[in-house]
Image (spheres, rainbow, N blue to C red):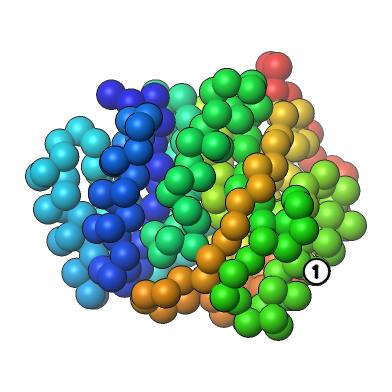
């Protein structure tokens, strides 16, 4: 078994999922893949199951009955990975906005350099985003600035969805206490990791807007993040976080 698993949440990703999984399996380091599919009506799960038959032990799937939210998909994947004792647990999109060739860079930051969370960061060296409408680039960039200002979280790309966690981080965090489901889920996970005292590194990556399939972005996701950040900061004043070295 590999020491690493890449969790990919899916909803209607039939155009991308096979190519993404095959690309990840072809990387030099053996990464396993777990797809968490929220009842995609387009047949995404059937494509994954065929790849499971071709690659037993390397490709896995959790099937859920409907669209239950990005955060809950990752929590389900995290628990699955912890049970199976993977040392390094990744979050990644199916749509190639995250470059599979960058996966080894995030892995090296944790496995070789000793960081507990590595983030594929769009903003640590400027703005590395391709083919996004300017309005969305500005919204995302200033959302991260806002989060950093409110929370004092020393991370440039607080909403990044391309991450690698050491298992001990996810074992230390009370995953059932993570409340948010959309963009704010990514913020809450990073903030909690930081408050627990874990070491975080941002690895510069180039984010490319999806070519195939449909974006799952919505205004509600941004409003959750905007107001959720204030709640997150205020609740942190009254909460005792488990410590990394505990």
Residue annotated with mark 1: 142
Q: Is residue 201 visible?
A: yes
Residue 59 place in picture, x, y as percent: 24, 42
Residue 107 place in picture, x, y as percent: 52, 32
Asked if residue 164 is positioned above or below residue 82 in the image, the reply reads below
Asked if residue 115 is positioned above or below residue 59 in the image, the reply reads above
Residue 7 place in picture, x, y as percent: 40, 46
The structure residue drawn at horizontal position 46% and vertical position 71%, both measured from the top left corner, is 210
Does 43 sit left or right of 207 as displayed? left
Q: Is residue 242 visible?
A: no
**Disc 1, SS:** helix
Residue 227 place in picture, x, y as percent: 76, 69
Query: Considering depth in this image, is 224 or 42 the residue closer to the camera?
Result: 42
Task: Tell me the crowding category of disc 1: few under 14, some 14 to 19, or many 20 or more residues within 10 angstroms, Cα based.
Answer: few
The structure residue drawn at horizontal position 29% and vertical position 41%, both measured from the top left corner, is 25
Name the image quarter holding residue 40.
Answer: bottom left
Name the image quarter holding residue 172.
Answer: top right
The structure residue drawn at horizontal position 41% and vertical position 64%, both measured from the top left corner, is 95
Image quarter in which the C terminus is found: top right
The structure residue drawn at horizontal position 37% and vertical position 76%, both measured from the top left corner, is 213
Asked if residue 214 is positioned above or below residue 67 in the image, the reply reads below
Query: Considering depth in this image, is 157 or 188 the residue closer to the camera?
Result: 157
Instruction: Report the number of discs.
Output: 1
Does 226 sit left or right of 210 as displayed? right
Image quarter in which the N terminus is found: top left
Does 101 sit left or right of 134 as displayed? left
Does 28 sit left or right of 145 as displayed? left
């Amino acid at each position: 078994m590999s020491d690493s698993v890449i969790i990919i949440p899916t909803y209607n990703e039939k155009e991308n999922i096979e190519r993404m999984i095959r690309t990840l399996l072809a990387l030099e380091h053996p990464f396993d893949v777990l797809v968490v599919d929220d009842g995609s009506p387009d047949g995404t799960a059937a494509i994954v199951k065929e790849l499971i038959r071709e690659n037993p032990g390397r490709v896995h799937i959790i099937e859920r009955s409907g669209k239950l939210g990005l955060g809950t998909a990752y929590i389900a994947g995290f628990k699955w990975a912890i049970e199976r004792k993977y040392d390094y647990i990744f979050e990644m999109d199916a749509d190639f906005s995250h470059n599979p060739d960058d996966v080894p860079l995030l892995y090296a930051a944790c496995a070789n350099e000793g960081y507990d969370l590595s983030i594929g960061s769009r903003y640590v060296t400027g703005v590395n985003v391709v083919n996004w409408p300017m309005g969305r680039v500005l919204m995302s960039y200033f959302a991260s600035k806002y989060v950093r200002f409110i929370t004092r979280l020393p991370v440039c790309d607080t909403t990044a969805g391309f991450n690698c966690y050491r298992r001990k981080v996810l074992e230390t965090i009370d995953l059932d206490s993570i409340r948010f489901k959309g963009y704010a889920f990514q913020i809450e996970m990073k903030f909690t990791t930081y408050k627990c005292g874990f070491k975080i590194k941002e690895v510069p990556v180039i984010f490319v807007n999806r070519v195939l399939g449909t974006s799952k972005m919505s205004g509600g996701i941004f409003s959750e993040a905007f107001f959720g950040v204030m709640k997150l900061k205020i609740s942190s004043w009254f909460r005792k976080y488990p410590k990394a070295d505990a």
